[in-house]
Image (cartoon, grey):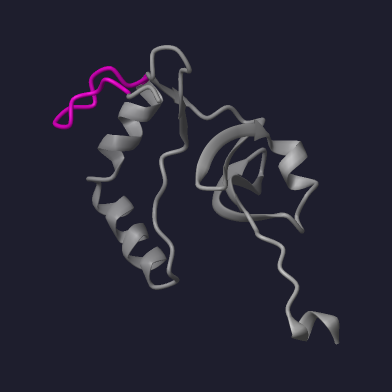
Amino acid sequence: MTTAIVSRTTAQGLPPELRRAQAAVQLPEVQEMLRRLSGHGLGIYMPHMHDEKSGDFLSLPDDVTQVEAGLEVSFQAAAEIADQADRFLPVAWLWRAGAVTAAAACEMVQTDSPADAE
């Protein structure tokens, strides 16, 4: 596993859009949004991925979804994940192209229980 090289005390080394996101969390209007979201059990997420070789932070491309499966994180084509709604549970959302879209999803384990058989 490659570790990103970014100081804990500064956002230097992040792409400009991710530096902007880090700074925005300190804005009163963003903190108010976070307060309101927390009432719904939601939070704020900085969509990102990492360069496979350097570990550097990268913005999450519009056509990519972060996927957690088997306690491992990968980045997959958003369309493929969206087409498998019975397998992947969205856990992070973005506003893209005028609509809500999943930015991250967790793979759900299929189990058969006695209630499923009925």
Horizontal side, residue 39 vs residue 114: left or right: left
Q: Which residues are magenta?
A: 4-15
At x 32%, y 65%, the residue is 35
Is residue 4 placed above or below 88 in the rendered structure?
Answer: above
Q: Position of residue 3 (x, y in %)?
A: 33, 24
In this view, the residue in front, 15 or 7, is: 7
In this view, the residue in front, 66 or 2, is: 2
- Inspect the magenta stretch and tell me whether residue 8 lies in it: yes
- Inspect the magenta stretch and tell me whether residue 3 lies in it: no
At x 39%, y 13%, the residue is 54
At x 30%, y 53%, the residue is 29
Horizontal side, residue 62 vs residue 79: left or right: left
Is residue 52 placed above or below 113 in the rendered structure?
Answer: above
Is residue 109 placed above or below 74 in the rendered structure?
Answer: below
Is residue 81 placed above or below 86 in the rendered structure?
Answer: above
Q: Main secondary structure of the magenta part?
A: loop
